[in-house]
Image (spheres, rainbow, N blue to C red):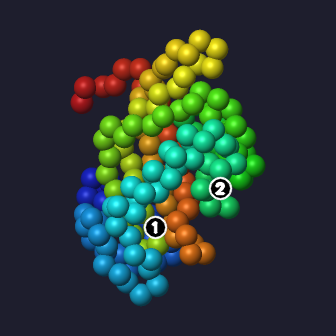
Amino acid sequence: MKWGNGVFLSATLAMVAGCTNLPPVNDTSAPVVAGCAPITTEVVDAQFQRFTDAWATGDAERVADLFAPDAVLLATVSNTPRTTREAIADYFEHFLVGKPVARIDTGAIRLGCNSAARFGTWTITLTDAATGARTEVPARYTFIYKFQNGQWWIDHLHSSKMPESAPTH
């Protein structure tokens, strides 16, 4: 299946959320389907804003609170998959020392039943605590959100640094 037309991603979101009645993947506001939380691109944007606002507090526990209890974090600057709340908080305890600030460079959003995905490229600016020097880290990202127990959670976050040199084709 192709990623470009959203078919594979929509099917994945349906499996994650346990739903099969999905709206078209290119809609910016999904129709309300029985058993599905209302979702729009604005709701997804708000989830990303919650995430970056939590980063700004410097509080790893606050960031970890945004993740579902069974979430998976494949982080930008760690080779270790984080699959527990404690492991996610531990990652952010160290990562937040760099006072990260994220800027979305490119992105797309796909909406599903009790789920949504945001993916693309972003730049994370880190500040060295000792010198104040700033470093920009271009990376790719995928956020998968799920609606459970009356709220939106980060179910999966994968961010990886851009390759040093990318092929031209």
Q: To which residue does mark 1 refer?
A: 115
Q: Relative to the observer, which residue lies in front, 151 or 24?
A: 151
Asked whether disc 2 touches disc 1, contact meaning CB atoms under 8 Å apart, the reply is no
| Residue under the image location 55 percent in, 70 percent down | 151
In the image, 35: left or right of 61? left
Rendered location of residue 116, percent (x, y): 42, 63
Q: Nearer the viewer, residue 65 or 143?
A: 65
Q: Position of residue 22 (x, y in %)?
A: 36, 75
Tell me the tag on residue 155.
Answer: none
| Helix, strand or loop for disc 2 | loop
Q: Earlier in the sequence, mark 2 or mark 1?
A: 2
Residue at 30% of width from left, 55% of height from top? 2
Q: Mark 1 is on which residue type?
A: Ser
In this rendering, position of residue 40 left or right of residue 99: left
Position of residue 43 relative to residue 55, above or below, is below
Residue 156 is drawn in which quadrant?
A: bottom right
Label 1 secondary element: strand
In the rendered image, residue 56, in percent from the top left (x then y), is placed at: 55, 40
